[in-house]
Structures are given as structure tokens and as C-alpha cells.
Image: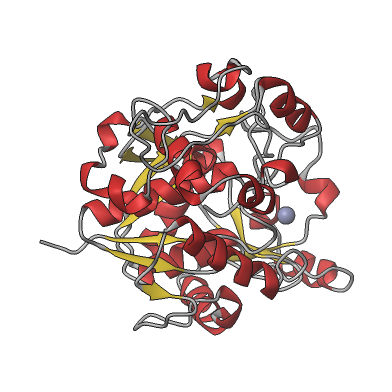
Amino acid sequence: MQTLRGRFAPSPSGRMHLGNLFSALLAWLSVRRAGGVMVLRMEDLDPDRCRPEYARQLADDLRWLGLDWDEGWQKGGPHGPYLQSERTERYAAAFRALEGQGLLYPCYCTRAERLAASAPHRADGQAIYSGKCRYLTEEERVELARTRRPAWRIMVPDREISFTDGLQGPYRENLLRDCGDFILRRSDGVYAYQLAVVYDDGDMGITQVVRGRDLLDSTPRQLWLYECLGLTPPAFFHVPLLCAPDGRRLSKREHDLDMGALRRRYTPEQLIGLLAFWAGQMDRPEPAAAAELAPAFDWGKVPREDITVGELPSVEKAAKPLFRERPHGGRGSFSCEKVTPSTMRSVISDAHVAGNDGF
Ligand SMILES: [Zn+2]
């Protein structure tokens, strides 16, 4: 049987937060349960947001949680380098291969033009690209190129692309109607997340991608790229997001819930136990080591719907500790007086909706 290959693919643009940890734990448990190989790849393509010190911190945080990897950044392996910033030549080659198939064209639209209110929008608020620059004449391109550096888009087909998500079930999208031609290289020359993630997962032989549900709708675009690049797509598992009581997802902006704050308050076992409880792998949130949970890990118990952190009974009852002391001592006690509904809400109320976090 084929060895399962999973990956952590964090973006080193800040400290991980609870939502990242949730995806990371599920990805790790799934791989360890199957006796597979875990890969760590740093998605540090965006020079404006990513920092080497964040990458080191991310790796340290994963180790602290007991989530190890067999291949990847700081470890090496046959599919390196494992920093996306060191793989741009490969993305350039993939880009040229697509260009050679006549699938790419330059887009001169400004950001304002792309995001114009008059443009049709997807349910999630992203603008659907009209295809305007697909039909420019060579003359018009030359004229526009005098003053603007283009982004590059890939043409999408007018047909449904469907797949079955391991957790969310069947999903389909007509890319032309629901998305439009999408950007593979930004006007500043940085390759887009979509190209890099597909190329890397394909090149690294990843067979299972576990990530947040917010990336579900980018999967048809990625499947189109897998097809065009002649790469084999992995199985996808889109896991629920952790949300604030008002429905917003937890993000890197909630610094009180990022790894820096969490490590000061909790032990790794306390955090893992809480995440495993949310993931349906434990009946109660009790301290547990990640390695202890792996043998019994079951995708069938993972909820599909987003998880509202503040509404969990154990968090809701402020007087009750989140982790109770075991009658026989066990792994020690833990009281969660610092994460009461009120503190959780006050932390969350300052939050903003963040972009993709890479997991
Ligand atoms: Zn355009």
C-alpha cells in the first residue's frame, strides 16, 4: 500500500494560534495513525509578511506540542528545499510549462479595477475576475505595458471540477462562472500561493492535505493546476474552523490565544487535550500527549461544522475548571480560570477576520 504522506505547511508570518494548532494536530494524528510520513514545509513566499524568526518559532512550537515531522525544514529529506523562498526557480519552471501550453496571459488591471464593486463576487466576498485582459489585442498589451507591470493569470475551463473531501463530502465548482481566471504570479513577481502550494504538494509526493475549511473553495482551482501540471492531487480533508461566539474565526490577531500566550499558561498535554476534545477524539478535555491519541485517531469522529469556542460547555461554565484533576492523580491538574467566556470574548471581540494561514 502507498505510504501516506502528510504535511504541515505553515506561513511564518506570526505565531500559530488555536485554529492553526487544531489543523496541525489533526494532520499529524492522521499521518501517525496510518504510520505515514510527516513533512514540514515553510510557506514563506511573501517577503512582506514572513520572517525567519517566525519560522524558527513555529518549528519550536510544533516540537513543544509533541508534533514532530520526519522530513522537511530543519530536518532535510529527498524533496528539499523545504522553504518556499528557496524554491522560486521551480515555480518559475512550472510557470513556464503552463505558459508553453498557452494557458497564461498578462493582466494589467489595477487592484481597484479588480476589486470594483461592480464586479461579480463570490459568496465569500472575493471578486470573480471578468476575463477582461484575456481578450486584449497585442497592441493594447503593448500600450498598457508602458505604464503597468502585469500580474499573470491562468485561463480556467467552463466546466465543473468536482472532488470528494474526506470530511466535507462532495464539492464542485465551475471555475469560469464561480471564480474566473486566477493569478499565478503577482505584478511584483511573487508567485501566488495557489501555484506554489500545488507545485510543492505534487513535487513532495504529498498524498493527504489537512487544512482549514476556509480553503475548501480554493481546491477546485488547485485541482485545475494539478491537471495542467500533470501532477497527482492528494486527498483533501478540510477541517472545521475555531470561531468566536459571534461567528468570526480565530486568527493570528488574537494574540492572547497565540502560541506565545498559550505556552505561558498551559502544558502541551493540556492544550492537546483541549484540541482533541474539540476534534471529537476525547469525551472530556483532559490532558493528553499527542502520541497517546494517535493509535485511536478516527476521522469519523471529527465534526464537520465550525466549532464555537466560547459556547463549549466546559468553557461556558466559568466556575468550572476546564481540566479537572484526575481522581488518581494522573497527569496533574489544570484549571482554566484564565479562559472563561468573558475573557475569551474580550479577546475575541478585538479580533479581525484574517486571511489564509497556510494550514
Ligand atoms: Zn485584467
* Colour theme: secondary structure
Residue 324 to residue 203: above or below: above
Quadrant of the image occupied by residue 173: top left
Q: Is residue 33 left or right of residue 253?
A: left
Q: Looking at the image, how many numbered discs can be counted on the residues?
A: 0
Residue projecting furthest to the left: 1
Give the residue at x 46% y 28%.
324
Give the residue at x 69% y 39%.
127
138 vs 216, nearest the viewer: 216
Give the residue at x 50% y 60%.
64
Image quadrant in which the N terminus is located: bottom left
Residue projecting furthest to the front: 328
Q: Position of residue 347 (x, y in %)?
A: 76, 32
Q: Is residue 161 left or right of residue 306?
A: left
Q: Is residue 118 left or right of residue 198?
A: right
212 vs 262, nearest the viewer: 262
Residue projecting furthest to the right: 147
Residue 41 to residue 346: above or below: below
Residue 148 to residue 264: above or below: below
